[in-house]
Each structure stands twice: as structure tokens, then as C-alpha cells.
Image: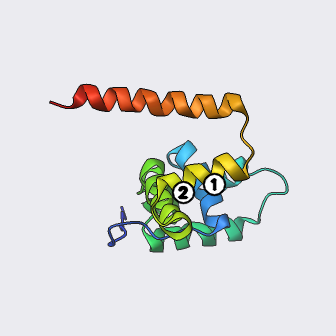
Amino acid sequence: MSTRKNTSDSPSSLTRAEEEVMQILWKMEKGMVHDLLEKFPYPKPAYNTVSTIVRILEQKGFVGHKAYGRTHEYFPVISKKDYTKSSFRGFMTNYFGNSYNSLASFFAAEEKLSIGELEEIQNTINEEIRKQKEEQP
């Protein structure tokens, strides 16, 4: 069984095609290439395309496999949560200089959020503030 892991602290980024395969594999938890192919929307990519992407994902350390003769069952090595956290950190660094205030300002101004959406965000933030205050000694 191969579980080759990414040796860096954070996973490398994924191409759009690689991320699409990973999204399917995260939902399935494990599967053979033909199983993955069944989950793709129409028009489905070619079998060889999906097979190549899975092997690239394995080289990048995102996927491991268990061999059954010449057939391989693939599974995620990196959780969706860990990849999401790593990707978001990169997004924050590259686009907002690690400033959550800049991120919030961008969405509030550029996305034309409704009063209801802004109030919902405010409520979420207020709830997190309350929780953190309760956890303080």
C-alpha cells in the first residue's frame, strides 16, 4: 500500500482538474478510477485523463493507493479540511496581505452584501467573540 505524503508543511496547490478529482475523492473516501469517473458530470472526461490526474495527485502527495493486482484503489492522504485551511492561508497572503480586515472590507464593498448578509456576518463574529471571552482565564 502506498501512502506517499507531501513532505512540505503545507500541501501544494491543485489545478482546477486536480481539485475536481479531489472533491470527488473526498466525498467517496476511496475508489478506483472507474468509480471516480462515474461521479463526474456530463460531459465526462476520458478514463485516461482521470487516471493521469490521479497519478499526478499521488506524486504530489494528495492521494495514496492500495493495489489489488494491476488495479488500484485510491484514497485521499490530505483531508479536505487541511487543504482548505492551507489554500485559504495562501489566498489571504496573496490577495489580502494576511489582513482579515481587508478581506471583510473587500466583501462588504465589492460584493454589495445586503444588510441581512452583513448582519449575519456580524452575528457570527459576535458569537465568536463571546466564545473566546468565555475561554479566557
Q: Which residue is mark 2?
A: 102
Which is more toward the observer, 136 or 31?
A: 136
Distance between the Cα atoms at labels 2 and 1?
Answer: 6 Å
Question: 125 or 67, which lies in front?
Answer: 125
Quarter of the picture holding the C terminus:
top left
Mark 1 neighbour density, 10 Å: few (under 14) some (14–19) many (20 or more):
few
The residue where tag 1 is placed is: 106
Tell me residue 120's x, y (percent).
Answer: 60, 29
Residue 46 point in image, percent of width and height? 76, 66
Quadrant of the rendering where the N terminus is positioned: bottom left
Above-or-below relation of 125 to 81:
above
Which amino acid is tagged 2?
Ser
Query: Percent x, y for residue 110?
Result: 72, 53
The answer to the question of whether label 2 and label 1 lie on touching residues, with beta carbons closer than 8 A, is: yes
Under tag 2, what secondary structure? helix
- Asked if residue 84 is positioned above or below residue 122 in the image, the reply reads below
Identity, as a three-letter code, of the amino acid under mark 1: Phe
Q: 9 or 75: nearer the eye?
A: 9
The residue drawn where x is 56% and y is 43% is: 27
Is residue 118 shown above or below 64?
above
Please indicate, yes or no, whether residue 75 appears anywhere in the rendered image. Answer: no
Q: Residue at x 50, y 52 (%)?
A: 101
* Image-quadrant location for residue 11: bottom left
Q: Is residue 56 left or right of residue 109?
A: left
Q: Position of residue 122 (x, y in %)?
A: 54, 32
Kindly indicate the quadrant of the structure image that contains residue 128: top left
> Which residue is depicted at the point 63% across and 34% down?
118
Q: Is residue 29 left or right of residue 21?
A: left
At label 2, counting other C-alpha atoms closer than 10 Å, the crowd grade (few under 14, some 14-19, many 20 or more) is some
* Residue 121 visible at all: yes
Secondary structure beneath dot 1 equals: helix
Residue at left offset 46%, top offset 72%: 60
